[in-house]
Amino acid sequence: MLTIKPRFETFEEYLLYDDNSEKLYELFNGELIEVPPESGFNIEIANFLFLTFAQLVGYRRVRGHGLELEVRGEPKNRYPDLTIVREEHIQQLSKRNTIRLNMAPPLVVMEIVSPGEIQRDRDYIAKRIQYQDCCIPEYWIVDPQNQTILILELVGNSYITFGEFKGDDLLRSPTFGQLELRIVDILNAN
């Protein structure tokens, strides 16, 4: 039996779609592209950061991979590995875990780079441009392969490097100055 994939002219049409599954999709040129599951190692890092930030800001403000961000360009949405939302988002996200372009941006988004050149370019280039365009104040690129964490800060309309941390470095964040995390502890989160 031939299955016809739905096409969407607008992001609003896509938001009305429900295939009664737990699958995550990116909307690319009107078509749904299933987002593959994360590696176990990336999940361990994300969980470590989730627990750290939940203690810092409260668990309701920390969102894992299931939070969807509407962005400009293609695809029209992204699923950051970890997002720190604003207090006002908690109520807005109660029905659908999607931050729209007309909403205030989240405070921080974090991506954990998966192996491969395509994934690296996606996190370091494509997502950087889209998150910058959304005016997200802070973007973390957690790179297990290079054993680094790059923190970008939005200054004006552009991201600048706030810091690149590795090894025993103590991570600093422009938004969360009270953080006291060593990079080695984050990247060896087990």
Image (tube, grey):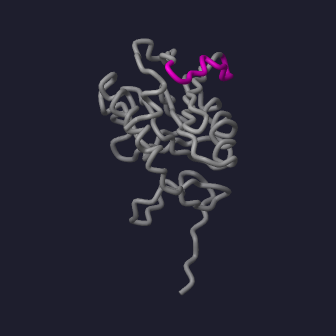
Quadrant in which residue 9 is drawn: bottom right
Residue 21: horizontal and vertical position, in percent?
A: 40, 64
Q: Which residues are magenta?
A: 156-168
Residue at the image position 30 percent from the left and 32 percent from the top? 59
The residue nearer to you, when weighing 53 against 78, is: 53
Considering the image in quadrants, where does the C terminus appear? top left
| 45 relative to 29 in the view: left or right | left
Residue 68: horizontal and vertical position, in percent?
A: 48, 44
Residue 69: horizontal and vertical position, in percent?
A: 52, 41
Q: Is residue 181 above or below residue 61?
A: above
The residue nearer to you, when weighing 133 against 91, is: 133
The residue lying furthest to the bottom in this view is 1
| 121 relative to 59 in the view: left or right | right
What secondary structure characterizes most of the magenta part? strand
Q: Is residue 121 above or below residue 165?
A: below
Q: How many marks?
A: 0
Quadrant in which residue 164 is drawn: top right
Residue at the image position 48 percent from the left and 51 percent from the top? 39
Q: Is residue 72 above or below residue 142?
A: below
| 184 relative to 159 in the view: left or right | left
Residue at the image position 43 percent from the left and 38 percent from the top? 46
Residue 153: horizontal and vertical position, in percent?
A: 59, 20
- Residue 122 falls inside the magenta stretch: no
| 146 relative to 99 in the view: left or right | right
